Image (spheres, rainbow, N blue to C red):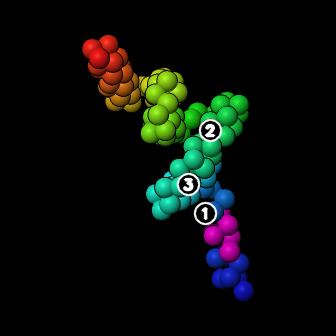
Amino acid sequence: MFRMLLIVTCVAGVTACAPPKMYNWGNYEQGLYNSYKDPNQTEALRISLEEQVVTVESSGQKMPPGLYAELGTLYLQAGSSDKAKIYYEKEKLAWPESATLMTALIANMDRQADSKTQSKGKK
């Protein structure tokens, strides 16, 4: 009996000391998995990430690393480069270590937009 009480106490003590979640990821992992498994679920992932952004921003928590960039990439894939830039800029501000990559992505989008504009002007 004493042994069982000791085991239960140890297990309860260890699980009670688990650190709190550092970031609120929502159901990002499941949504990402679903969109990889079925590309028709990509729109559902975008909507879910938009909701997650609102939830995290309104709670004052720090956005998990990469979520702004993921949402930006979904907008870019959908053809909305202006919205993609907004979220790439947010990622850059939230996570300064991503600045080089986000800046490069934005510059690449700008170059592509410039080349499209120039090719339309030549026709």
The amino acid sitting under disc 2 is Glu
Looking at the image, which residue sits at the far front?
Answer: 123
Q: Mark 2 highlights which residue? A: 50
Q: In whole angstroms, how far apart are the C-alphas of marks 3 and 2?
A: 14 Å
Q: Is residue 75 above or below residue 7?
A: above
Residue 85: % across, % down = 46, 25
Q: Residue at x 68, y 82 (%)?
A: 4
Looking at the image, which residue sits at the far top?
Answer: 121
- Quadrant assignment for the C terminus: top left
Disc 1 residue crowd, few under 14, some 14–19, many 20+, Cα 10 Å:
few
Residue 63, label in figure? none
Q: In whole angstroms, how far apart are the C-alphas of marks 2 and 1?
A: 36 Å
- Quarter residue 7 falls in: bottom right
Tags 3 and 2 in contact by the CB under 8 Å rule?
no
- Quarter residue 24 falls in: top right
Q: Earlier in the sequence, mark 3 or mark 2?
A: 3
- Magenta residues: mostly which secondary structure? helix
The amino acid sitting under disc 1 is Val
Residue 37: % across, % down = 48, 62
Secondary structure beneath label 3: helix
Q: Mark 1 highlights which residue? A: 14
The amino acid sitting under disc 3 is Gln
Is 11 magenta? The answer is yes
Q: Earlier in the sequence, mark 2 or mark 1?
A: 1
Q: Mark 3 highlights which residue? A: 41
Q: Is residue 63 above or below residue 13?
A: above
Q: Nearer the viewer, mark 3 or mark 2?
A: 3
Q: In whole angstroms, how far apart are the C-alphas of marks 3 and 1?
A: 39 Å
